Amino acid sequence: MATPVGDPFAASGVSGSDLIARLPKIWIGYLLAFATLIGETIAVARHPDLVKGTEIGVPPLEIYLPAFVGLVYWLVCIHRYHVVLAHVPGWKHPISPARAVWFHFIPIFVVYWVFRWPAAIADFVNQRLAANVMNKWTVGFCFFASLLCRLFLDASLHVALLFFACTYISGFLQRALAAPAPQHG
């Protein structure tokens, strides 16, 4: 049987270290948060009225573009987490990578979804480590905190909080994937 071209999981024996290497690169997200901060600085230098909040409308491109790219990369990270979990030997992950991303685009349902998909990851981590170490609610709360930051405070803090949640997930996934699979018997 031929494997699809470019399938990163084509090898029959996928090890934990192979899966760890496939986790998203979170530093890219923090770099995008920093780019958003630089964009905010440039936008305020060009339009001092932004600080006063008197200008209402579309945010300047210097702020909008890196923040938007940061949000898109956050969705890429979510997709990657679920791709990795779908390839863990002996684990049947309940959420497909596409569903993990696309359900973020359903208004109102996203309120539930930002808590549901991290809970599925926490189930894997907690089962693999045989301990209740990953909180199921933390990522959802980080998402809402980032949304509040975006609305009321700062776009760069919004992006940074999204990737803080990814740092939380990646840390626990690295630990779980490095641990030996539990023996059922």
Image (cartoon, rainbow, N blue to C red):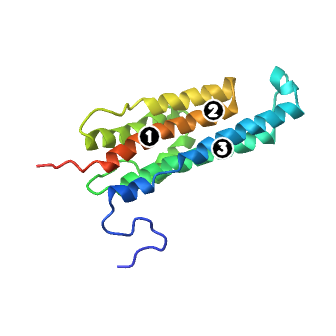
Amino acid type, label 1:
Ile
- Residues under labels 3 and 1: Cα distance? 18 Å
Q: Position of residue 87 (x, y in %)?
A: 36, 58
Q: Position of residue 177 (x, y in %)?
A: 34, 49
- Residues under labels 2 and 1: Cα distance? 17 Å
Regarding mark 2 in the picture, which secondary structure is present there? helix
- Camera-near label (2 vs 3) is 3
Left or right, 170 with respect to 71, comes to left
Q: Earlier in the sequence, mark 2 or mark 1?
A: 2
Q: Position of residue 59 (x, y in %)?
A: 79, 35
Amino acid type, label 2:
His
The front one of 2 and 10 is 10
**Mark 2 highlights which residue?**
158
Regarding mark 1 in the picture, which secondary structure is present there? helix
**Mark 3 Cα shell of 10 Å, populated few (<14), some (14-19), many (≥20):** many
The front one of 148 and 40 is 40
Amino acid type, label 3:
Leu
Q: Are marks 2 and 1 in contact (CB under 8 Å)?
A: no
What mark, if any, has residue 32 been given in the picture?
3
> Where the N terminus falls, by quadrant?
bottom left
Q: Position of residue 69 (x, y in %)?
A: 66, 47
**Mark 2 Cα shell of 10 Å, populated few (<14), some (14-19), many (≥20):** many
Res 18 visible = yes
* Picture mark count: 3
Relative to 144, say whether 117 is above or below. below
Left or right, 103 with respect to 95, comes to right
**Residue visible at 36% across and 41% down in the picture:** 120
- Residues under labels 2 and 3: Cα distance? 11 Å
**Mark 1 highlights which residue?**
169
**Residue visible at 53% across and 50% down in the picture:** 25
**Residue visible at 71% across and 39% down in the picture:** 36
Relative to 24, say whether 142 is above or below. above
